[in-house]
Amino acid sequence: MKKKVMGVMAAVPAAVLGTAAIRTALMKAKPAGERPACSRNETELERMGHDFARMIQVKTYSWQSEKDNEAFEKLHAVIDDLFPLVHEKLEKTVLEDEVLLYHWKGKHAGKAVIITGHQDVVPVEGQNWSYPPFAGEIHEGKIYGRGVNDDKCNIFTQLAACESLLKKEFVPDSDIWFVYGTNEECSGPSAVHAIAWLKEHGVAAACAWDEGGAVVDKAMAGMDRPYAVIGITEKGYADVKFTAAGEGGHSSAPKAETTMTRLADFMHDVNHAHLFECSFTPHVRAMFENMAPSFGYGMRFLFGNLWLTEGLLTKLMPKISNQGAALLGTTVCFTEMKGSDATNVIPTEASVVANVRTGYTQGLDASLAILKQKADQYGLKMEVLSSREASPVTPTDTKVYAYLCRCIHHQFPDCGVSPYVMMGGTDNRHYADMTPDCLRFYPLRLSSAQLGTMHSPDENVDLSSLSDCIDFYAYFIENWKAEYGSEAV
Ligand SMILES: [Zn+2]
């Protein structure tokens, strides 16, 4: 691959390469600041961890067959107990599906800051954990458990920030709403219900802030600092079923082609044919240009001179990195298969489901049309089980966005900040109905390894990161001005 890159670059005139090299040398990022010391001592961290563990101990599954309203009620009782001032001073509403809303009245009427999270967690069945997943055990400064990261941490730290500000009798500049859904993990409608309720009650949003990008150490290889990444859009999504129908029969004398082999050929083709266009859309371009100065020379040259390297990177990235492919275009992942119910029967009907995440150059319709063409080629029936378009892109030239960046620089001075494209979904996409200023950011420091424990065994976070997260929410709320929610810069 190295040879190929050099070969392509060799075709570029020396003067152009020289310009790019000089630009790269001048592009160095400002030296990163020091990571501030944690504001809580070890005893305080332990106490905070034990408080948080009480929320982890309530098993709030949202999968339909397992949704247990009593568990959510129990979680509400724990929250009331952990945050007595929140309970006493904020106006609390519980919707029918256990969505929890808190209204904190500000000094100025007008647009409110909506801060959200979700109470539900994904199952742990079949996973091998080092510690019990619903205990919230603390080991070497880290708390382990399902939901410590996704997403009970958000609820805990937001309300802890609120509690600490209430203790000081602080009143926010704008109204603040905390909204906690109950079925984000299964794409359920609780956020939609909450939004309908808020609109019905005349709430206008200055911004809607949800989980999303975190403060990640080594977000990309070769970076010289951790990066706080703010999700500004979520890719489109579709679950698509492909069915092959054909002759069945006994498996003892099979034909060369069966319903199963046709599906297999189709899957192999889709996986290897590079069906979808890859491109640097403006927000992907902005992300790399933003991050480029923090890379070492080679990567800085490549990503800091997209005017020269874009064509090359568009070809290379999907081949060398799954994340790169996902950033630049539509992806297809086959996830569920169904064939015969017996080991010795050729199925007359076999099917496979693909999870599709659509890009921005080829949206939902264009991506599905390409898949349909391929399915026709193999004589498969194609059925779209569910789908949604990509969420609108949050503008980054607004006072709201600039304010969030300022808060990040203040609270995480050792980190870079960048917008990014979210591959996964959050409840936040629904809030685009209320405001264009949808922010997907998790003020939580995570290592790449911790990031990988989300939805997986041994989900864990550092207690010191939890503490920083509380301080971040408190800083944001304390310094927020009603005027930020008005219009573009
Ligand atoms: Zn989540």
Image (spheres, helix red, strand yellow):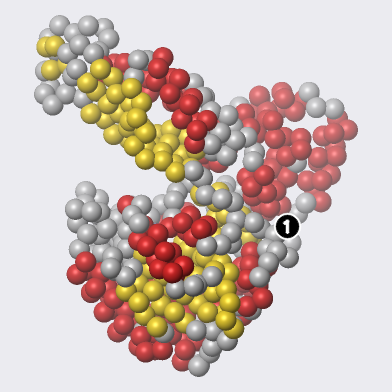
Badge 1 marks a residue whose secondary structure is loop
Q: Residue at x 72, y 25 (%)?
A: 8
Quadrant of the rendered image containing residue 380: top left
Is residue 311 rendered to the left or right of residue 81?
A: right
Can the viewer see residue 307 in this picture? yes
Can the viewer see residue 465 in this picture? no
Q: Is residue 247 above or below residue 404?
A: above
Q: Residue at x 54, y 84 (%)?
A: 106
Residue 90: image location, x then y, percent: 41, 84
Question: Looking at the rendering, in which quadrant would you find the C terminus?
Answer: bottom right
Is residue 249 rendered to the left or right of residue 472?
A: left
Question: Looking at the rendering, in which quadrant would you find the N terminus?
Answer: top right
Q: For mark 1, what is the residue? A: 29
Q: Is residue 108 above or below residue 320?
A: below
Q: Residue at x 56, y 62 (%)?
A: 435
Q: Is residue 353 above or below residue 468?
A: above
